[in-house]
Image (cartoon, rainbow, N blue to C red):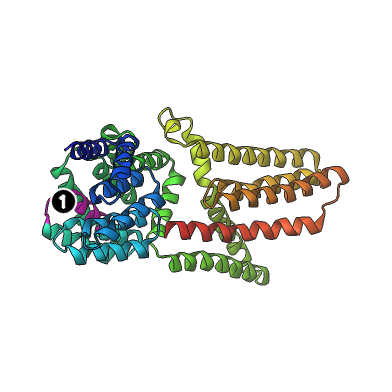
């Protein structure tokens, strides 16, 4: 009886979000009875909620070894793999949960979530519809259905579905946040802000809503709104199509440059296009940190940015400011060293913009190497008035290589 009471207390603590306290109680119970399925399951959930995914997986595997036909254990395991971004494994365990208990709508909800993460939007919609056929008022299934419909460009039906979810639970923070993201993708930043605000009112620590609020505030700037449209469009593509766009853009620009170099008639028309394309490509790297710099002037916005986002925006701002001042210095002094400094600080904005992205050790290391190479070129130019060509060429190719490296990790992370 005492054990049952403690398990109930731990379950209540989990519902209240007091995961560490629940973990302590469940850990003590597990030492007394290491083969108790309920204790193992709840302790796995407590670790999962604290992002201790490896420990959570170990515990749920122990539970599965004791009860291999329990659907809820495979449901939990699929959630763990979903949050580890291992979607194939997550999908496998969700399907196992469905095969064990096909009448549980939650198994289809998690499958829909996993399929959305893999950008299998039609399959995600089918899974959400199957969940709703079992439980028409399931708020999470309605959320999955709404998102899948939005990605399939059925906006009207998507928003009708999310309104239905709000009708079922008007105070659900996730639904408000999901609605906000949908409105943001549609281009309605004002209404999106309202729903993000409502989500944060109900759950101030909701990271999904916090991220949406940041994007909605930055969408006040017209250039960022254009970038956001491009970003949503790219994010809806699978990785091979994303690479197709990036490589097509790169080689298309190279082709235009070659045509402009060899055709004097077309050159006056092509050069402005090439410049605009180059500026667009460059802006996609730095617009996030630059817009964060402006967002820090907003009373609410500055509290939504993480420490790393603030530092990244500061570094990009410093390099941008130095580049502008260097250009001014060049026109005043005609000293090519200022021009080299301007080029160095301008190009460094791209690697610095990704400084705190994952895998952080690679990006930090790359930035250090680029800074040392570029800094050496600048110092030698100021001291000896000669550009060290060999090092400058290495820096240039490092700059080009970073764009492909950055895109590689970015696409892998998003997919």
Q: Is residue 249 left or right of residue 369?
A: left
SS for callout 1? loop
Q: Which corner quadrant holds the N terminus?
A: top left
Residue 162 in sight in this render:
yes
- Residue drawn at x 31%, y 54% is 60
Residue 188 in sight in this render:
no
Residue 401 among those drawn in magenta: no
Residue 144 lies, in percent from the top left, at: 24, 55
Vertical placement of residue 227 versus 273, above or below = above
- Residue drawn at x 13%, y 44% is 168
Residue 402 lies, in percent from the top left, at: 61, 57
- Residue drawn at x 36%, y 57% is 81
User: In the picture, residue 88 is in which quadrant?
Assistant: bottom left
Question: In this orientation, which residue lies closer to the viewer: 48 or 181?
Answer: 48
Vertical placement of residue 92 versus 230, above or below = below
Residue 141 among those drawn in magenta: yes
Q: Is residue 281 left or right of residue 140?
A: right
Residue 354 lies, in percent from the top left, at: 55, 49
Residue 52 lies, in percent from the top left, at: 40, 46
- Which range of residues does the magenta coloring cover? 135-150
On the image, numbered disc 1 is attached to which residue?
Answer: 138
Question: In this orientation, which residue lies closer to the viewer: 399 or 55?
Answer: 55
Q: Residue furthest right?
A: 384
What type of secondary structure mainly makes up the magenta span? helix
């Amino acid at each position: 009886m005492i054990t049952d009471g403690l398990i109930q207390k731990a379950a209540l603590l989990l519902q209240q979000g007091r995961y560490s306290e629940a973990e302590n109680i469940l850990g003590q119970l597990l030492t007394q009875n290491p083969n108790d399925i309920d204790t193992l399951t709840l302790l796995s959930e407590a670790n999962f909620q604290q992002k201790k995914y490896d420990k959570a997986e170990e515990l749920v595997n122990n539970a599965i070894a004791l009860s291999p036909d329990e659907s809820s254990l495979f449901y939990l395991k699929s959630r763990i793999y979903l949050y580890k971004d291992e979607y194939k494994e997550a999908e496998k365990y969700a399907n196992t949960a469905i095969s064990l208990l096909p009448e549980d709508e939650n198994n289809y909800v998690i499958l829909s979530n996993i399929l959305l993460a893999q950008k299998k939007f039609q399959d995600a919609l089918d899974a959400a519809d199957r969940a709703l056929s079992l439980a028409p008022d399931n708020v999470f299934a309605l959320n999955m259905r709404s998102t899948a419909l939005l990605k399939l460009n059925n906006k009207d039906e998507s928003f009708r579905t999310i309104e239905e979810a709000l009708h079922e639970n008007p105070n659900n923070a996730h639904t408000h946040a999901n609605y906000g993201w949908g409105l943001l993708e549609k281009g309605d930043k004002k209404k999106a802000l309202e729903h993000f605000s409502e989500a944060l009112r109900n759950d101030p620590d909701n990271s999904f809503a916090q991220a949406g609020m940041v994007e909605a505030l930055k969408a006040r700037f017209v250039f960022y709104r254009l970038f956001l449209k491009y970003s949503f469009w790219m994010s809806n593509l699978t990785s091979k199509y994303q690479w197709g766009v990036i490589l097509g853009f790169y080689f298309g620009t190279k082709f235009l440059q070659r045509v402009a170099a060899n055709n004097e008639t077309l050159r006056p028309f092509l050069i402005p296009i090439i410049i605009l394309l180059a500026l667009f490509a460059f802006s996609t790297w730095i617009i996030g940190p630059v817009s964060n710099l402006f967002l820090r002037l907003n009373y609410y916005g500055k509290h939504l940015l993480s420490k790393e986002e603030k530092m990244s925006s500061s570094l990009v701002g410093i390099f941008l400011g130095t580049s502008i001042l260097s250009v001014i210095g060049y026109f005043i002094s005609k000293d090519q060293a200022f021009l080299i400094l301007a080029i160095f600080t301008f190009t460094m904005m791209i690697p610095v913009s990704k400084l705190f992205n994952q895998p952080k050790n690679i990006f930090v290391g790359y930035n250090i190497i680029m800074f040392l190479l570029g800094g050496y070129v600048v110092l030698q130019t100021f001291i000896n008035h000669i550009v060290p060509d060999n090092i400058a060429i290495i820096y240039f190719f490092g700059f080009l290589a970073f764009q492909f490296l950055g895109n590689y990790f970015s696409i892998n992370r998003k997919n």
